[in-house]
Image (tube, coloured by chain):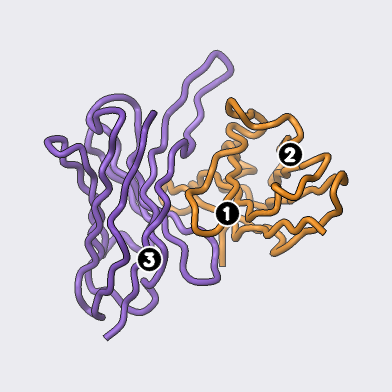
Chain colours: A orange, B purple
Amino acid sequence: QSVLTQPPSVSGAPGQRVTISCTGSTSNIGANYDVHWYQHFPGTAPKLVIYGNNNRPSGVPDRIAASKSGTSASLTITGLLAEDEADYYCQSYDTGLSGSWVFGGGTKLTVL
Amino acid sequence: QVQLQEPGPRLVKPSETLSLTCTVSGGPVRSGSYYWSWIRQPPGKGLEWIGYIYSSGNTNYYPSLRSRVIISLDSSKNQFSLNVRSVTTADTAVYFCARGVLDCRPTGCFEYIEYWAQGTLVTVSS
């Protein structure tokens, strides 16, 4: 069981908007630690798509955005494309585990 | 451009030690504010952080693995390594090596993973 909780799956039609939630606690997200998001196509190297809660690395389209509030964070993809179909993971830092990086369980995004 | 390269698939027997090495190109492992990390993904499950070694040599491990894991740096070969002793079938996973960074900007400092290797499957089986 992951320290950060994500829905196992979300789906949307091309052009639509989807949101993936990441729920933590007062020892991680709620303690004001940053949340980062990674996109993963199975069999390949994961890719950073959001760092520091809402910052996009160079090359990541502005269709991908994120936010954080309280003990939760969310990733939103607008104008859904077939190429967005992948697994998405949130990641933060947790003080309750002697200072450890923690991941969410991952969310499979399906483009219908 | 930084690249991280892992070996091919491995088969390890239960109770033995799993050893993996990640070769880094595009920058020395002993310089900068980097966290040389290992993450794994058991079959059908999500990502699990194992630990990291900072460029200075300090280490940090996930608590449930701390008693069995050692991560080390070899600056002469520009590599970093993972050793997990006394493995069981629960250690079967795709293992990723990665580079985390401490990125300080006017808006604050962020720790995140900026480069990943493709991952290598380690199977624990007799």
Residue in the image at 51% along x and 44% along y: A93
The amino acid on which the numbered mark 1 sits, given as a three-letter code, is: Phe
Quadrant of the image containing the C terminus of chain B: bottom left
Q: Secondary structure at mark 2?
A: strand
- The crowding category of the residue bearing disc 2, from other C-alpha atoms within 10 Å (few below 14, some 14 to 19, many at least 20), is few
Tag nearer the camera, 2 or 3: 3
Nearer to me, B100 or A15 = A15
Q: Give the image location of residue A85, x and y in percent.
A: 70, 53
Residue furthest toward the left? B76
Quarter of the image where one finds residue B77:
top left
- The crowding category of the residue bearing disc 3, from other C-alpha atoms within 10 Å (few below 14, some 14 to 19, many at least 20), is some
- Callout 2: chain: A
Q: Give the image location of residue A53, x and y in percent.
A: 64, 34
Nearer to me, A68 or B100 = B100
The residue tagged 1 is A41
Quarter of the image where one finds residue A5:
bottom right
Q: Give the image location of residue A99, x and y in percent.
A: 43, 46
The residue tagged 2 is A69
Instruction: Calculate the distance from the C-alpha at mark 2 to the C-alpha at mark 3.
Output: 36 Å
